[in-house]
Image (tube, rainbow, N blue to C red):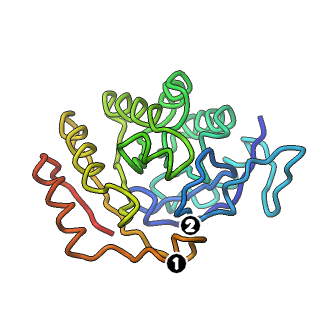
């Protein structure tokens, strides 16, 4: 089993709990207006080669990632969107679990429920992005709907495998209040205590009209945090 690797960060303190090695696979099934990592979007194929991407076997990726095993708490696999390479991803996760390594997945959740259930067997926790609650708004933002995202998120919540859920707050083009309201209601309906991370949009590194959108104010972010707290979320983080 072989797959496409963009890069490995040996030590990361922002990709899950503790010190972790972060793996970034190539390819994404979203085309977000505010994407800050456009180099990871292209899906590699014989007709679409992508520079600075390694094509390697699952065993080789595992060995590369565990070079600093004694100094990390676990592994986090991200992208792009790592589930684009679902068969390779499952194989890699299996091999990590065989080595008794904690595995987190950073995902947008856009894949079939059948595939997501299979992946969940080999993953300790997921970090989920819910970018917009309204399906039409999500389609405008990412190019696809969010039905699979919500379905998989509910499943992961139901089996206790969500570490945190995140929403990027973008003024003017998104109904941020609705998304925070509905996501926090959904999270609060489950027993697990889940962190809800509200991320300020930054226009550094974005393209097109998104450069004209300003970062939301601290006051606006605090209002959204209050919405989530009032719905019963105990751990709300603004970054």
Left or right: residue 219 versus residue 33 is: left
Identify the residue at image location x=24%, y=40%: 187
Task: Say above or below: 137 vs 12.
Answer: above
Report the disc number at residue 221: none
In the rendered image, the quadrant that contains the C terminus is bottom left
Measured from the top left, where is residue 130 in percent x and y? Answer: 40, 47
Q: Nearer the viewer, residue 34 or 75?
A: 34
Identify the residue at image location x=38%, y=32%: 156
Left or right: residue 195 versus residue 132 is: left
Measured from the top left, where is residue 201 in percent x and y? Answer: 41, 69
Q: Residue furthest left?
A: 230
Q: Name the residue tied to disc 2.
A: 36
Identify the residue at image location x=26%, y=49%: 178
Q: Name the residue tied to disc 1.
A: 204
Question: Is residue 97 visible in the rendered structure shown here?
Answer: yes
Question: Is residue 127 visible in the rendered structure shown here?
Answer: no
User: How busy is the neighbourhood of tag 1: few (under 14 within 10 Å), some, or many (20 plus)?
Assistant: few
Task: Say above or below: 118 vs 69.
Answer: above
Identify the residue at image location x=36%, y=53%: 166
Give whichever of discs 1 and 2 has the lower sequence position. 2
Residue 38: which quarter of the image?
A: bottom right
Measured from the top left, where is residue 194 in percent x and y? Answer: 26, 46
Left or right: residue 239 versus residue 108 is: left
Helix, strand or loop at mark 1 = loop
Residue 115: which quarter of the image?
A: top right
Q: Check if mark 1's residue and mark 2's residue have beta carbons within 8 Å.
A: yes
Measured from the top left, where is residue 37 in percent x and y? Answer: 61, 64
In the rendered image, the quadrant that contains the N terminus is top right
Left or right: residue 217 versus residue 110 is: left
Q: Residue furthest right?
A: 46
């Amino acid at each position: 089993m072989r797959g496409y690797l963009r890069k490995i960060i040996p030590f990361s303190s922002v990709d899950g709990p503790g010190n972790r090695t972060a793996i970034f696979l190539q390819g994404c099934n979203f085309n977000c207006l505010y994407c800050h990592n456009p180099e990871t979007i292209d899906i590699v194929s014989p007709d679409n080669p992508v520079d600075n991407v390694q094509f390697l076997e699952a065993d080789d990726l595992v060995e590369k990632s565990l070079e600093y095993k004694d100094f990390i708490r676990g592994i986090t696999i991200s992208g792009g969107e790592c589930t684009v390479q679902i068969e390779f991803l499952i194989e890699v996760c299996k091999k990590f679990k065989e080595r008794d390594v904690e595995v987190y997945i950073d995902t947008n959740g856009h894949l079939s429920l059948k595939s997501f259930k299979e992946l969940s067997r080999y993953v300790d926790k997921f970090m989920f992005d819910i970018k917009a609650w309204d399906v039409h708004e999500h389609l405008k933002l990412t190019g696809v709907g969010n039905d699979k995202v919500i379905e998989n998120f509910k499943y992961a919540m139901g089996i206790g495998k969500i570490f945190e859920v995140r929403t990027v707050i973008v003024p003017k083009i998104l109904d941020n209040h609705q998304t925070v309201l509905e996501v926090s209601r959904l999270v609060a309906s489950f027993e697990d205590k889940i962190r809800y991370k509200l991320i300020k949009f930054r226009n550094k590194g974005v393209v097109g009209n998104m450069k004209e959108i300003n970062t939301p104010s601290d006051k606006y972010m605090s209002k959204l945090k209050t919405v989530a707290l009032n719905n019963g979320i105990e751990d709300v983080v603004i970054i």
